Image (cartoon, helix red, strand yellow):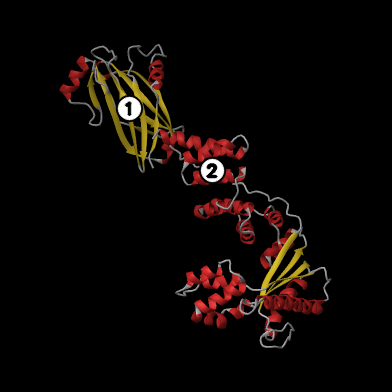
Amino acid sequence: MSKLLTTSLAAAATFAAAMTVSATKPAAVNVPVNNVNIDRNNDKLTIFMDIDPSQLSLASSREIVARPVISDTLGNQVEFPGIIFAGRSRYLIHLRDADVNSTDSLVKLKSKTIIPYSATVAFQPWMEQSSLDMAYDLRGCACSPIDHYTVPLIPIDLTPLVFSPEFVTVAPVASGVKTRQLNGSAYVDFPVNRTELYPNYRRNPEELASIRSSIDLVRNDPDAIITKITIKGYASPEGPYNNNVRLAKGRTQTLRDYVQGLYAFNPSIMHSDWEAEDWAGLRKFVANSDFASRDAMLSVIDSDLAPDAKDNKLKKTFPKDYAYLLKNVYPALRHSDYTVDYVIRSFTDVNEIAEIMRSNPSKLSLNELMLLAQTLDPQSDEYAEVFKTAVVMFPSDPVANLNAAVISMRRGDFDKAENYLSRADESTDAVYARGILQALRGKYAEAAATLQPIAQLMPQAADALAQIQKIMNKESKK
């Protein structure tokens, strides 16, 4: 990448003043230098400047050699080709003797033309922080030395500016009670038009076992307490609606009584609901089907017709498709959905939290995960794993997404960070993270605009903004 340093026109005035500081330096020896630039391109370094000899005054037998020099404080130095400004007689002697070094240039005194100077050398690492000076040799007749002095032109700083922000993770708001919910569906078979439950009837052993296993999973967990069990029964749309009301309501109550009898829960825990006909389930299947008459069937399902009229119209208008639904879809619409609501105790021991994160992270709150993170090295894989776990467990939580974005930025995964930030909120911390991501992607102007409004609210934003502005200023001089 090219790195460029530029002097202002004021540098020429400073230089001219420096030429007259010492009484041993003739006031007339003044070679103004303007527009000093330094350009690094990979392994090459080039200097540029404009030299104006129009006001230079020397005796006919004298000359002054101006030679740019790059040096550092450790004694490293590189000289560039010089320019010899010669009085009339010295100029003619050089022409006669052809004694000017092949790399130097000879200029006759009183030249009115500004000389554009440029020269290139191999870049060396020590040049990153050095200085560019102009070395002068004032000579008399026969090139006898009269004076030698050096005038600074510009400091050189080619060290790359690296954007190094502070990555800020955010503590979530205390969540209080940790409520969780386990959901499932069971397809319990009942005899036709009956509400009695027979545990060994058809596939009931397997379906009832799935309900028991879900409840037992929570009931046998020492860290969990069941607070509510809800069973909601559905019937399929065929048959008279009023009869389906009776079936859905009665079968749900029967299944609730069955569960209550197994566990002897406090009656306040048990809840039930019912829906006579599962039209939503039917609609979902039809919408995802490849029926040729799919749209027409959906129009009937979505109509304001009464349930029985709706079912009859489907049966008469689409007899082939209805027969398929009756055989393959309607049985699945006779189901009982159940939910087990429970709470998880709190954890405060970080070792226990670490173990639970590995074995069953769903038990943890964001606060507990943050408590663990605070004990880990922010640069470690374990630290990153905590925030990755948090966003998996709480995928829609703004704080979890913000923290996951911060970890992704720290690891250089900017695309993933952007995805997480799309689910963060508009808090100051989230705005800061978006500005940091823009800067890390080299979008400094956008980043500055993002961070400017919060720079006085957040010290990290003020520091990042200062870094960005410094980088932008340096890049503007290229």
Q: Is residue 81 left or right of residue 469?
A: left
Q: Which residue is mark 2?
A: 435
Measured Cα–Cα span from mark 2 to mark 1: 38 Å
Q: Residues within 10 Å of mark 2 (few under 14, many from 20)?
A: many
Q: Which of the marked residues, 2 or 1, is nearer the chain's N terminus? A: 1
Q: Which mark is residue 49?
A: 1
Residue 95 in view (yes/no) = yes
Q: Nearer the viewer, residue 50 or 460?
A: 460
Q: Secondary structure under badge 2?
A: helix
Marks 2,1: beta carbons within 8 A:
no
**Residue name at image x 52 percent, y 72 percent:** 286
Q: Amino acid at mark 2?
A: Gly
Q: Position of residue 381 (x, y in %)?
A: 60, 58
Q: Amino acid at mark 1?
A: Met
Q: Nearer the viewer, residue 196 or 416?
A: 196
Q: Nearer the viewer, residue 235 or 78?
A: 235
Corner quadrant of residue 283: bottom right
**Residue name at image x 24 percent, y 29 percent:** 101
> If the image is split into quadrants, where does the C terminus sit?
top left
> If the image is split into quadrants, where does the N terminus sit?
top left
Residue 161 in view (yes/no) = no
Q: Nearer the viewer, residue 71 or 250?
A: 250
**Residue name at image x 37 percent, y 38 percent:** 40
Corner quadrant of residue 340: bottom right
Q: Secondary structure under badge 1?
A: strand
Q: Position of residue 202 (x, y in %)?
A: 67, 88
Corner quadrant of residue 233: bottom right
Q: Is residue 179 left or right of residue 237?
A: right
